[in-house]
Amino acid sequence: MGLLAQRLVSLQEAENEVRKFKGKITEIERAMIRKSGEVRKLKEEYEQRVIDKEELIRKRVGLERALEVVLEEQKKFKTARNMTKSNKLYVELTAAIVKGERDIAGREDRILDVFEEIESRESLCKQILLGVEVEYKKFQEVLEVNKVKVAELLARLSLCKMRREQVSSQLPIQAYDLFNRLSKRMKGDVVVGVMLFDEYSDEEATYFCKGCRLSVTLEQVNQATVGEDVVQCQHCSRILAWRKQEENSIGALELPRELKE
């Protein structure tokens, strides 16, 4: 393999390492965003439960005030009944007092129901708050661990970028520009090997681009073998680099030890 091809392959390997560490960092960041969202959702649920409880407390206060009004009326009815000398008025006041007592009993029952509901909401709020505190503590612990992981990954990413810059500086500007254009336009590797496929022919071997899996000409294979010029697949425009038969992937070249996992 020629020097130009070797450098293009090395650049592809360095680019892959950069993508790998960027992907790991992004994965951790997304996981933390999801976890933060879960904690925030629990907190919002707690806040809503507190609002519901406060609404019930206001309702209870309103019921108690209304009850006080009814009790005051009952006192007036009883006082008036004790002072009246008219049998008819006495009967009417007694009926009003009985009706008022039934109303009072109903209001007291409603106040008791609301009070029990408030206690239930209070208990639920405490449970949710405890859950929020537990999850937040877990989140903080995971966050600290992931900060260390991200710091390590960023350090390794920096090394990979340095390696990439080092390799790219050794390439002709035209080759480097082509690599960048293809990388922006395509997914995956843009420097690929050539596959030899001769299962159906004993006389003539067929070569395929490892990127698009379409056949390439023997002339392109020969040029890729020499590796002194940039050779592109006529189908997908990826850069072809001839590899030894036992090398199954572009990543066969050795990276510096500090760039390996």
Image: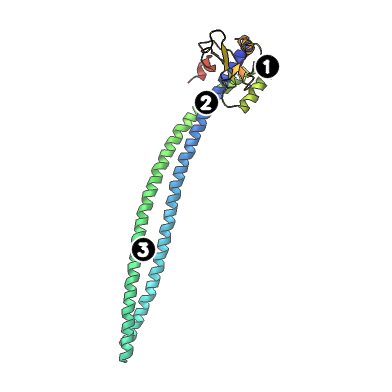
**Residue under label 2:** 20
Dot 2: within a 10 Å radius of its alpha carbon, few (fewer than 14), some, or many (20 or more) residues?
some
Q: Indicate the secondary structure of the residue bearing disc 3.
A: helix
Q: Indicate the secondary structure of the residue bearing disc 2.
A: helix
Front-most of residues 54 and 229: 229
For this view, does 187 lie left or right of residue 42?
right
Q: Amino acid at mark 3?
A: Val
62 vs 5: above or below: below
Quarter of the rendering containing residue 105: bottom left
In the picture, the disc for residue 172 is 1
* Residue 135 position within the rendered picture, expressed as x and y whole percent measured from the top left: 40, 42
Q: Amino acid at mark 1?
A: Pro
258 vs 83: above or below: above
**Residue under label 3:** 114
The answer to which of marks 1 and 3 sits earlier in the sequence is: 3
Confirm or deny contact between disc 2 and disc 1 (CB under 8 A): no
119 vs 73: above or below: above
Q: Indicate the secondary structure of the residue bearing disc 1.
A: loop
